[in-house]
Image (cartoon, rainbow, N blue to C red):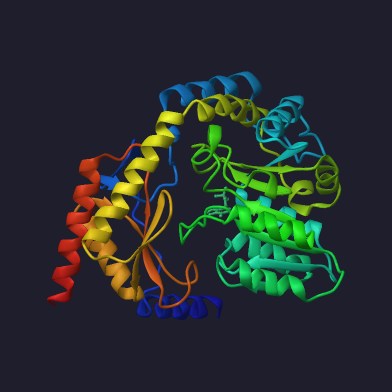
Amino acid sequence: MFEKRFLKRLEIQKQNGLYRNPPEIEHREGRYIISGKRRVLNFSSNDYLGLSTSAEFSEKVADNFHKYGTSSGSSRLVSGNHSVIRQAEERYAERFGYEDSLFFPSGYQANIGVISTFFEPGDRLIFDKHIHASSVMGIQLSRADYKGYNHSSLSHLEKRLQVGGNRPAAVITESLFSMDGDLLNVKDLAGLKEKYGFLSIVDEAHAFGALGKNGCGIAGKVADVAIGTFGKAFGFFGAFVLLPRSFKEFLLNFSSPVIYSTALPAAHAASAVDLLELVSGSDEKRERLEKISILMKKQLLEKGFRVKGDAHILGVEIGDENMAVMLSKKLYQSDIFVFSARYPTVPMGSAILRISMTAMHTEMDVAYFVETLTREKERIADG
Ligand SMILES: Cc1ncc(COP(=O)(O)O)c(C=O)c1O
């Protein structure tokens, strides 16, 4: 009975161009993936600084696992509260200018854990309509009253803030949006915060490591709570939440994903500390990332593509889901791997080719991408 339903749903996904079937990767080599013995240029990875294949970091991680073992053995509250983890969290808090921080096994879990725990029925949550699925899930689980505002429209946010009286309010946004690639208007958000006094939660998953001084992101003091992930520019896995000390205490006591899930091991925390130095010392890589991203956008625009994105995430607007899939398949045949983001990741009818630029990409990679995409689009148009 269930299988029949699942197969039917999968068939509908295929018909609508929404079926997911990513290529299998055998190996990663810098900006390439090796798949089916082919070397494919990768524009689908959030490893923005290239740290995930850094020999230096891999060695440090291996040493840490040798030293501390492979598991924390249990949840943080049962037997996983290792001093190495606490010290690492203190280091992150200090570096990013917060009272404290708390590590999670993933950014997805962090957003759910934080948002679903902090808020309760009667609270007002106001969020950018394009925030990540994990934040939306956290909002729904909290059972607070919630309203979205149009993507990046702080005037719409202000309208939302004007209604609802004195009930506690929180605003949830990203600093660099994962699909649109645009940046939060930090100054205007700070102005609204001053005027309306809400709590702000800013997900800097795509900005931490890649943007700002020492890779400390762009939201700074406007975020009461900031979400970071190790899985993107940090080239690792897991996540960190920057927050006031009392908020951490609250999460340790009431957040289901913290209480009922095995903590990341001490070796992870020790490696996270190593990463702090690697990431802050990556100014050249950040400059390179910025430069190559600007070049990619410029060249795509020159060829007449509609491109969104203010930094290293660029979206080539395609619209039709089947067309986006077809283009990304054609590019793959030419040894380019780029993700076709479709509903529900982006709104229906707004499919994009989501280009993740990294500091490892070269001018020749950009030229090859633009040339191949232009050619394939023309071929499809010519039937
Ligand atoms: C904005 C944003 N927040 C959170 C996450 C989840 O982070 P993680 O991959 O560490 O689970 C993602 C991942 O895609 C994301 O784009």
Residue 16 picture location, percent across and down: 38, 79
Q: Is residue 276 left or right of residue 94?
A: left
Viewer-proximal residue among 313 and 144:
313
Image quarter for residue 153? bottom right
Q: In this view, does 162 lie to the left or right of 96?
A: right
**Above/below status of 218 relative to 355:** above
Residue 111 picture location, percent across and down: 67, 54
**Residue at (55%, 81%) from the top-left corner?**
1
Q: In this view, does 15 lie to the left or right of 138?
A: left
Give the position of the C terminus as an image quadrant.
bottom left
Whether residue 327 is visible: yes
User: So how many labels did they put on this image?
Assistant: 0
Image quarter for residue 338? bottom left
**Residue at (79%, 47%) from the top-left corner?**
259
Whether residue 37 is visible: no
Residue 51 picture location, percent across and down: 44, 33
Residue 252 picture location, percent across and down: 82, 44
**Residue at (85%, 73%) from the top-left corner?**
165
**Above/below status of 220 relative to 184:** above
